[in-house]
Image: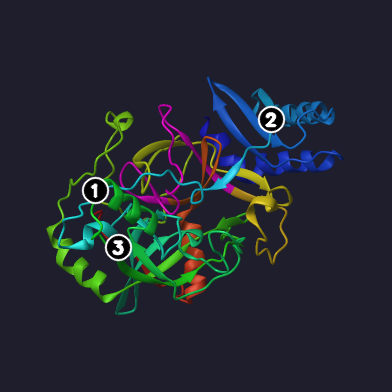
Amino acid sequence: MDPAIVSDYDKIIQPKFLAILRSIKGLAWTSFILDNESHQYKLDITTQDPSNSKWAEASTALQKAFLDLTHRKLRVNVVKSKTFEEMRFVVPRSPQPYDASSKNPFALYSLGRSIGVEQLDYPGTLGGIITVTTGDKSRVYGLTNNHVVNIGKTTNTQPRDPTHVETGNVIYCPNYHDLEATKIQLKNTKLKNYKIAQLRAASGRSLIMPARATYPCIVDWALLQLNSQTLNNMLDEIPKLKANFQLHRTPQEKEARPFPAQITYDPNVHLVNGMTVFKWGRTTGITSGEVKMVRSMMNIDSVETWKGKIHNPQRYTEVAELVVGPRRGVPFCDSGDSGSLVVDERGHVVGLLWARADDDVIVTDIRVVFESIREKMEWGPNAVVSFTPNF
């Protein structure tokens, strides 16, 4: 994709598209994303009513606007709205393998490992472990999604309240689901999971307006207060880590580059179109994907049915979300991978994934996540955030 078009998209092209869609009465859309396929620019629009005759008018106006702004032709593709789902609720009935004979449980609760809340059958992923330094003090936290570990008014049979935050929930590894499945698979009833942390703070599924941004993003994060056993094991294990340590990858990914040996955070590195990215998740392990256009517009009014009641104090009607598509035909993630970090080929953390739209994965820019965390925790702009090595 032309770098000039990418750089102009947020400030020039996207607002123009929005103005056109708003100007045509009788149209209701869910999302749109600009992409480049075989040297042809296309705008994929999802809607509940793709047969509406007014889409022909909209397509003509969008094509003309794109031609005027870029001197390039545009193909408009209007399709039925995608199905969005958080990747926690329809979980495959297979355990995440782990070394059940290990005397040191630290390997069980490292990056990409299964975590969850006691007795709930909803496993998710521990994305990573971050260190926050304020002044001369440092604290270590686990990072995942809010909806993975925050049961707030939720049971296996009762509706969720995604805006609710209930701190103090005990976090286990592996998740109850994976523990029970592993007991059956290994025929070992003595296996147990470990209390690794408590829920320290969470976003409560809210909207945040990033600095210098035009549209807000949905944030879904949770910080885990690691307990003393976890921290002690970390101090023992970190010096022993091997730089090129790898977990088993799926057969389809064996030809792909391995997950980076070390992960870091650099606020100057972020998702860009065409970037190859990796994630390490509880269900599908290490997979790679390709960043599509870095902003997909979603109309809040159309997605509240699958979001529940979103905390939206600023009353925006659109949300900008990042999209990662499959690479080599291999899905980037599956149920239970919620909370995984998304990193580039050099190991820079660029996003936190939390939902799926058909084959595409919805990712929140990690800078937005950290901005929300700083505000929630009242750390201030001088707090330094870093990541521990992979485990």
**Residue 208: horizontal and vertical position, in percent?**
59, 62
Judge whether 177 appears above or below 166 on screen: above
Residue 71, located in which quarter of the rendered image? top right
Q: Which residue is mark 2?
A: 79
Q: Main secondary structure of the magenta part?
A: loop
Q: Quadrant of residue 283?
A: top left
**As drawn, 84 above or below 149:** above
**Mark toward the viewer: 3 or 2:** 3
Q: CA distance from mark 3 to mark 1?
A: 15 Å
Q: Quadrant of the C terminus?
A: bottom left
Q: Is residue 81 left or right of residue 377?
A: right
Q: Can you identify the residue that label 3 sits on?
A: 193
Identified at 61% across, 45% down, the residue is 10
> Contact (CB < 8 A) between labels 3 and 2?
no
Q: Is residue 338 magenta?
A: yes
Q: Secondary structure at mark 3?
A: loop
Instruction: Give me the disc on residue 175.
Output: none
Q: Residues within 10 Å of mark 3 (few under 14, many from 20)?
A: some
Asked if residue 339 lies left or right of residue 9, the reply is: left
Residues in magenta, as a range: 321-350
**Residue 6 point in image, percent of width and height:** 55, 37
Amino acid at circle 3: Asn
Q: Residue at x 43, y 43 (%)?
A: 92
- Mark 2 secondary-structure assignment: strand
Asked where in the image residue 149 lies, by quadrant, the reply is bottom left
For residue 178, above or below residue 252? below
Residue 134: image x %, image y %?
36, 76
Instruction: Specify the amino acid type for callout 2.
Output: Val
